[in-house]
């Protein structure tokens, strides 16, 4: 447009030259301005470019530094085995590093805390983790650290140490994002566990352990060490064992131990140990030297056990194998040893050996009625007395139970021996005070004597002869001395034969119940009878109970006999009942029945089998037998009484029952022993006792039966004193069932 203007101006001549000049000036200015501007632009561009390149360089540096630091971080994380995690609590999404190393899972398999991680957590550890997190979320803690177990993809548990902290919270403080690290601490945990185990083994072990450095300075001791030695941990640790300053008893031994350790690296054996109180004790010791990998000695470890208790037990055992624990006397084993020695010595010197066998009388009853403790006390007292009486005896031994043996060597004459034996019985008879009721008991014994070589040639025979003689003394009523003789031997053999025959008799049914009627006073009617066993001996004819019942007791045959009699008697009583002659049938039972515990079922079954009503059966138990096993006896007889059976106390007056005992015993009847009735007419005491028994029995609501009534005068006496029933030869001897049937029929017809 300016060029167009210029052309127009030229067409109008010189007027236009001024304009042109002005235009040119302006143009020049314009160019200059433009050039300046361009210049400015250029320099600005240069400055800018410089700036940009500088910035680029800076950025590159920064980027490089960042890359380096990231590499370093990764290296550090890698070296520390730490895994980083970043958890968005809003979306539950979590990002980890080292996922595979810790969980054995790919990243995408562990995306959600609740969905993927929570199921892997060990149930026992849930609580720990939850508590720590909640505490932190509630801002009670700045961060949390917990240890828990996670199930690895291959199934094993991995111990994790987890540290975390909240990074973002909303306005209400709710956590939106958490960051943290995880670390596999399984190895450390295992190590901890092993250490814990080792230290608990160290401390809880029953064996004492001491750990020393190579210069015998104590580094550690366990609890058992302290218990055994009395040195506390503090007193022991740091202390160096000075072998030169050990007590004399230990010094030489430990020098030897030390030499072995130095030479062989170990030692084992029994030594004496030293307690803090200066006392030595036996111990079993093992010492080992411990070396490091290079073979240099680093420690010396000692294990030891205190043998004191074991030694005491061994000594005690040794004592027990030779001595009786209760009495302190030699026991059976030592007795045999001593007797053997005495016999050998006697053979060489031509001397004699005397053996006395002592057995306390009726000791079993004492044992049962007064209890084992009192019985033991009595045995102890008797042993003391024997020891005091016989200081010169070779041996006083307890053979067991209430049996004692005395070995005497040397030359005592027969009469001296008799005196000595008599003084043994006398010392036993001295009343002994027992704890029960402040009573004094008089105990007797039976004593058998045998002499080697007069009677026996060897210890075995000597023992058996003294025993036979003792049994003979017992058989004669106890409280007496018997010297062994050949007659005793014969007598014993006879008894043995009789026993065999009795066994056969029971099996072959040679036993038969006889019946002795009892007369009711004052009306003179027979309402009851007692069954008494008889033996139809194939050679010796009819034997009364007195001839074999004691033997049967000794041989343990009495229950079998009583059972047969009970069966026969109940059958017979039932027959008489059917025949219109109701008889209360009394049957003797033995305390062995009570001991065996089958009396009640036996009676029940016999009554059921025979059909006899229970009130027509009466059981008799002697007073002395009643006193055995008192508690059991009372219980069993109460059961029988409950069945309706009558119960009589036989041979009353010969035992020692007390009124209080009688009251507790559910008896229905007392049978006054025939020894009182025999002299009742001539002996005032017996008469008085008889009257007293009747009065007492009546006051206890018991029937009274008098046994062994042989004369009319006795009967009159008893009638006058209101005795309820009498039994004896005056009425009838024990007779067969057939004979008693006839007896009763006769009396019935007589009126
Ligand atoms: P026990 O029960 O006191 O029996 C009374 C004993 O005195 C009977 O002796 C009897 O024959 C005898 N006797 C009866 N009246 C008179 C008399 O007027 N004068 C004399 N001197 N004696 C008379 P037995 O039959 O020899 O019986 C002795 C003991 O044997 C019985 O004494 C009893 O304790 C026991 N016994 C008998 N049969 C059995 C039985 O079947 N089982 C059990 N366990 N013991 C029995
Ligand atoms: Mg009787
Ligand atoms: Mg009797």
Image (cartoon, helix red, strand yellow):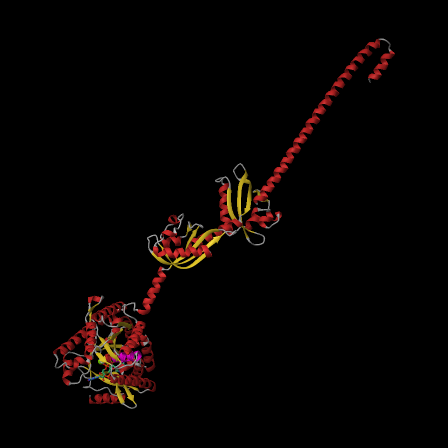
Instruction: Tell me where residue 209 appears, x and y as whole percent.
Output: 42, 54
In the image: residue 119, left or right of residue 20: left
465 in the magenta segment: yes
Picture quadrant of residue 24: top right
Quadrant for the C terminus, please. Answer: bottom left
Tag count: 0
Work out whether 469 lies above or below 372: below
Picture quadrant of residue 410: bottom left
Q: Along the line of sight, which residue is nearer the eye, 638 or 154? A: 154
Instruction: Tell me where residue 590 appears, x and y as whole percent.
Output: 28, 78
Quadrant for the N terminus, please. Answer: top right
Furthest toward the top, the residue is: 14
In the image: residue 155, left or right of residue 483: right
118 in the magenta segment: no
Picture quadrant of residue 60: top right
Write the start and end of the magenta stretch as one range: 459-469
Instruction: Tell me where residue 497 appears, x and y as whole percent.
Output: 30, 85
Instruction: Tell me where residue 74 appears, x and y as whole percent.
Output: 60, 41
């Amino acid at each position: 447009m300016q060029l167009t203007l210029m052309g127009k101006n030229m067409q109008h001549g010189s007027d236009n030259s001024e304009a042109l000049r002005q235009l040119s000036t302006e143009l020049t200015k314009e160019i200059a301005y433009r050039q300046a501007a361009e210049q400015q632009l250029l320099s600005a561009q240069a400055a800018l470019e410089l700036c940009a390149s500088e910035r680029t360089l800076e950025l590159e540096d920064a980027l490089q530094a960042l890359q380096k630091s990231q590499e370093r971080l990764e290296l550090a994380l890698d070296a520390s085995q730490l895994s980083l995690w970043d958890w968005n609590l809003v979306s539950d999404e979590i990002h980890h590093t080292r996922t595979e190393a810790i969980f054995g899972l790919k990243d995408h398999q562990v995306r959600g805390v609740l969905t993927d991680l929570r199921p892997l957590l060990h149930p026992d550890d849930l609580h720990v983790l939850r508590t720590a997190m909640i505490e932190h979320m509630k801002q009670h803690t700045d961060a949390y650290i917990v240890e828990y177990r996670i199930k690895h993809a291959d199934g094993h548990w991995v111990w994790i140490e987890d540290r975390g902290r909240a990074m973002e919270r909303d306005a209400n403080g709710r956590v939106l994002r958490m960051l943290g690290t995880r670390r596999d601490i399984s190895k450390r945990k295992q190590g901890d566990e092993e250490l814990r185990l080792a230290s608990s083994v160290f401390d809880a072990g029953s064996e004492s352990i001491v750990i020393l450095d190579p210069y015998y300075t104590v580094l550690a001791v366990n609890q058992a060490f302290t218990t055994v030695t009395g040195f506390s941990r503090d007193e022991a640790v740091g202390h160096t064992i000075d072998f030169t300053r050990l007590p004399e008893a230990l010094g030489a031994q430990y020098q030897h131990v030390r030499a072995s350790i130095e030479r062989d690296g170990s030692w084992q054996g029994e030594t004496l140990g030293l307690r803090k109180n200066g006392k030595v004790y036996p111990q079993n010791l093992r010492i080992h030297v411990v070396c490091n990998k290079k073979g240099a000695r680093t420690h010396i470890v000692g294990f030891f056990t205190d043998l004191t208790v074991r030694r005491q037990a061994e000594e005690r055992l040794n004592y027990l194998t030779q001595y009786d624990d209760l009495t302190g006397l030699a026991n059976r084993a030592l007795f045999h040893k001593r007797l053997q020695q005495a016999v050998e010595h006697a053979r060489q010197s031509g001397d004699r050996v005397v053996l006395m066998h002592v057995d306390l009388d009726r000791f079993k009853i004492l044992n049962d009625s007064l209890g084992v403790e009192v019985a033991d006390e009595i045995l102890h007292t008797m042993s003391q007395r024997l020891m005091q009486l016989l200081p010169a005896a070779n041996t006083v031994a307890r053979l067991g139970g209430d049996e004692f043996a005395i070995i005497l060597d040397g030359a005592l004459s027969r009469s001296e021996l008799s005196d000595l034996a008599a003084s043994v019985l006398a010392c036993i008879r001295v009343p002994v005070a027992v704890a029960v009721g402040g009573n004094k008991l008089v105990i007797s014994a039976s004593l058998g004597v045998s002499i080697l070589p007069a009677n026996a040639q060897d210890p075995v025979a000597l023992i058996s002869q003294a025993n036979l003689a003792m049994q003979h003394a017992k058989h004669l009523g106890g409280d007496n001395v018997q010297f062994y003789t050949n007659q005793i031997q014969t007598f014993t053999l006879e008894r043995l034969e009789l026993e065999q025959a009795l066994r056969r008799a029971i099996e072959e049914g040679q036993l038969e119940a006889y019946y002795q009627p009892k007369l009711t006073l004052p009306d003179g009617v027979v309402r009851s009878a007692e069954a008494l066993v008889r033996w139809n001996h194939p050679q010796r004819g009819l034997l009364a109970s007195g001839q074999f019942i004691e033997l049967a007791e000794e041989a343990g045959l009495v229950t079998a006999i009583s059972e047969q009699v009970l069966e026969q008697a109940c059958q017979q009583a039932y027959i008489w009942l059917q025949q219109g002659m109701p008889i209360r049938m009394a049957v003797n039972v033995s305390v062995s029945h009570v001991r065996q515990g089958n009396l009640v079922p036996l009676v029940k079954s016999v009554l059921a089998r025979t059909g006899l009503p229970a009130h027509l059966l009466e059981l008799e138990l002697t007073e002395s037998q009643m006193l055995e096993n008192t508690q059991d006896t009372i219980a069993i007889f109460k059961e029988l009484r409950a069945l309706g059976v009558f119960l009589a106390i036989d041979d009353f007056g010969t035992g020692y029952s007390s009124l209080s005992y009688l009251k507790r015993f559910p008896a229905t009847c007392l049978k006054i022993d025939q020894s009182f009735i025999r002299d009742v007419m001539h002996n005032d005491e017996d008469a008085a006792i008889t009257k007293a028994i009747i009065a007492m029995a009546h006051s206890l609501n018991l029937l009274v039966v008098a046994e062994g009534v042989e004369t009319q005068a006795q009967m009159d006496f008893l009638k006058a004193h209101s005795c309820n029933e009498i039994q004896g030869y005056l009425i009838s001897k024990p007779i067969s069932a057939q004979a008693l049937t006839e007896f009763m029929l006769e009396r019935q017809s007589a009126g």
